[in-house]
């Protein structure tokens, strides 16, 4: 179990954060979920995470800004963008800014689990 891997989930839809938190904790990860992107950003400033899973479109601070802030502070953190608005141009921009992956909603939990496992492997190399 990778119980030393810390994952932050940021999504303004509480059910998304709750489902991801439950699923990933069952896999042995330490997970914190946030519905407020500003609070999440402040938490990352105090306590960096290994992996961030963030929605793209949110009030206050959007997922692209979270990606930029995280990569500036800790380039090794893996950022996974999830969004209901899947545009090729947006995905391209996210990858150019250092996103590890870009997932379109609705997604299957196994899809997230697979991407997280790949991110964990990438962290260890």
Image: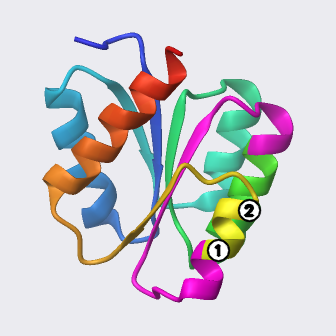
Q: Quadrant of residue 31?
A: top left
Q: Residue 40: give x, y in percent of width and height.
A: 61, 48
Q: Is residue 69 left or right of residue 76?
A: right
Indicate the position of residue 109 as horizontal and vertical percent values: 17, 55
Q: Name the foreground residue: 106 vs 88.
A: 88
SS class, disc 2: helix
Point out residue 42 in the picture as x, y percentages from the top left corner: 73, 42
What residue did someone put label 2 on?
96
Q: Residues within 10 Å of mark 2 (few under 14, many from 20)?
A: few
Left or right: 37 as drawn, with respect to 25: right
Return the x and y of residue 118 as percentages of the image width and height.
37, 35
Is 34 placed above or below 7 here?
Answer: below
Q: Which mark is residue 59?
A: none
Is residue 58 in view from this perspective? no
Q: Which residues are magenta?
A: 71-91
Q: Are marks 1 and 2 in contact (CB under 8 Å)?
A: yes
User: Residue drawn at (55%, 85%), measured in percent from left and top?
Assistant: 88
Q: Secondary structure at mark 1?
A: helix
Residue located at (55% from left, 27% from top): 50
Q: Would you place residue 17 above or below residue 63 in this image?
A: above
Image point 80% across, 49% down: which residue? 69
Tally of numbered discs: 2
Number of residues whose C-alpha sits closer than 10 Å to that of mark 1, classed few (under 14), some (14–19) or many (20 or more): few
**Furthest residue to the front?**
125
**Depth check, front residue: 3 or 46:** 3
Who is closer to the viewer here, 39 or 9? Answer: 9
Which dot marks residue 92? 1
Residue 79 covered by magenta stretch: yes
Q: Is residue 118 above or below residue 66?
A: above
Q: Residue at x 31, y 14 (%)?
A: 2
**Would residue 2 be counted in the magenta stretch?**
no
Tell me if residue 30 comes above or below residue 24 in the rendering. Answer: above
């Amino acid at each position: 179990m990778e119980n030393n891997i810390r994952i932050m989930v940021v999504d303004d839809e509480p059910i998304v954060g709750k489902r991801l938190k439950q699923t990933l904790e069952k896999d042995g990860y330490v997970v914190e979920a946030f519905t407020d992107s500003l609070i999440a950003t402040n938490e990352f400033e105090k306590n960096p995470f290994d992996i961030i899973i963030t929605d793209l479109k949110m009030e206050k601070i959007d997922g692209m800004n979270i990606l930029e802030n995280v990569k500036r502070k800790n380039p090794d953190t893996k950022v996974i963008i999830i969004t209901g608005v899947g545009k090729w141009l947006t995905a391209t921009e996210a990858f150019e800014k250092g996103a590890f992956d870009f997932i379109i909603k609705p997604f299957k939990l196994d899809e997230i689990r697979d991407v997280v496992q790949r991110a964990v492997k990438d962290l260890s190399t």
